[in-house]
Image (cartoon, helix red, strand yellow):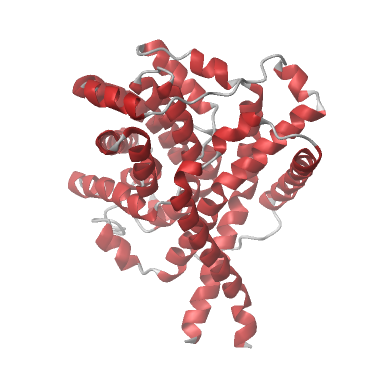
Amino acid sequence: MDTFFQLWHEAVNTSLGYFWMALWAFVLGYLISSLIQVLVTRTRMQEAMGESGPRSMMLGTFFGFISSSCSFSALSSTRAIFGKGAGLAPSLAYLLASTNLVIELGMVIAVFLGWQFVVGEYAGGILLILITWLLIRITRPRRLEAQARRNLEADEEEQDDTHKSWKEKISSKEGWQNIAQTYVMEWQMVWKDVLIGFTVAGIISAMVPDIFFQTLFIGSGDENSVHPGFAAVFAQTLVGPIAAFFTFIGSMGNIPLAAVLFSQGVSFAGVMAFIFSDLVVLPVLRINAGYYGWRMALYLLALMLSGIVISALLLHYALLYLGLLPDFSGISASVDREYFKLNYQFVLNIVFIAISTVLAWLWYQAKFHSEHHNDHEHHDHGNSSLSDRILKTIAVIALLWLIGGLIVPLMMI
């Protein structure tokens, strides 16, 4: 029994340590994301996207890049863009870019996995977009697309605050209150994913034996064969999305878990496939079915899965050819690691906690002393209420687990 309590405490210490390592990157990423969302108007974003063609694909990718990384928000925005007449391929380019090419995701990946995975994330995101575009041109789902448009209800998009320039917005208190509102809403969208993801990562790191990963991901954990054969890499690339499908944790919460997988010897392709799979999880499938119908939702699922597997394999063997494939032995998921020591991360965290405090105060003032602005209503997750309730319940359980793990040493005295 004492062994279980010790493992419990180690798991919680690892979860909190992982979060402390990534805290400054979260804050900086969401601050940049909030600045872009407030200063760049959504109306112009949507009007600029045409039906098809390279220009529309480039615009969809760019607008997704400057958008939010929340999967639910990205799904809602994509629905609005598609419903207003944008082509299916540019709409999916927006969706994929908004969940794979965002700044904050790259920062967190850099903290946990290193620069090769950052390159893989951004290069893979572009590959995903190109492969999806190609698959759409090959399969030509015109009937599905037409039916999906019929299933969409006409949404009245709110007008952006276009009468003010970005300079006027950033130099006014009202503009910073809008930025603060967006910043807080970003955290409100992802806190459950982050809490659950980091908690699960700590549990797996401390409690799950290596043999589990070697069984689930064929060929992993073999230090005598750092680069497994194609069959093993391909199998791991298929398992990655399947594992992500049942975890239903967003990409931001999945990064520390991806670091655990890589430290256990899962191939670069398998880990990248796992990271890319935030749009093939069960809640996303259900939401897409509600938007477009089940046939279109399953088509999108197959499209995404195909793109994920192909992209991950191309990235893996491109880095292997260039001699840049990272070695899993260089990543440590050990619970003995000193997470909270005084170093540059500690200083950065203090600085960005102070920035978050100021933004939270501005948000508080805007919430209770001024009228709410309608230009943030696209973050509403009303269509995912069941998923949200489930995630909240799991998040509460995760919070109780963390609190219990912290007080366990006191019980053992």
Q: Kindly identify the residue that appears in the image at 62 percent across and 55 percent down.
A: 20
Does residue 250 sit above or below 58 in this rendering? below
Does residue 191 sit above or below 292 in this rendering? below
Q: Nearer the viewer, residue 409 or 336?
A: 409
Along the horizontal axis of the image, is 180 left or right of 407?
A: right
Please tell me how many numbered marks the rendered image carries. 0
Along the horizontal axis of the image, is 233 left or right of 360?
A: left
Along the horizontal axis of the image, is 15 left or right of 383?
A: right
Residue 9 at what x, y percent from top left? 55, 74
- Asked if residue 280 shows in the view, the reply is no
Q: Kindly identify the residue that appears in the image at 51 percent across and 27 percent down.
A: 65
Residue 154 at what x, y percent from top left? 44, 24
Along the horizontal axis of the image, is 376 left or right of 172?
A: left
Quadrant of the frame with the C terminus: bottom right
Q: Residue furthest left?
A: 231
Residue 38 at what x, y percent from top left? 65, 27
Q: Kindly identify the residue that appears in the image at 39 percent across and 20 percent down.
A: 90
Q: Nearer the viewer, residue 135 or 384?
A: 384
Q: Nearer the viewer, residue 348 or 317?
A: 348
Q: Nearer the viewer, residue 113 or 140?
A: 140
- Asked if residue 306 shows in the view, the reply is yes
Does residue 101 sit above or below 268 in this rendering? above
Does residue 92 sit above or below 244 in this rendering? above
Q: For residue 288, which quarter of the picture?
A: top left
Residue 205 at what x, y percent from top left? 45, 64
Q: Kindly identify the residue that appears in the image at 40 percent across and 24 percent down.
A: 91
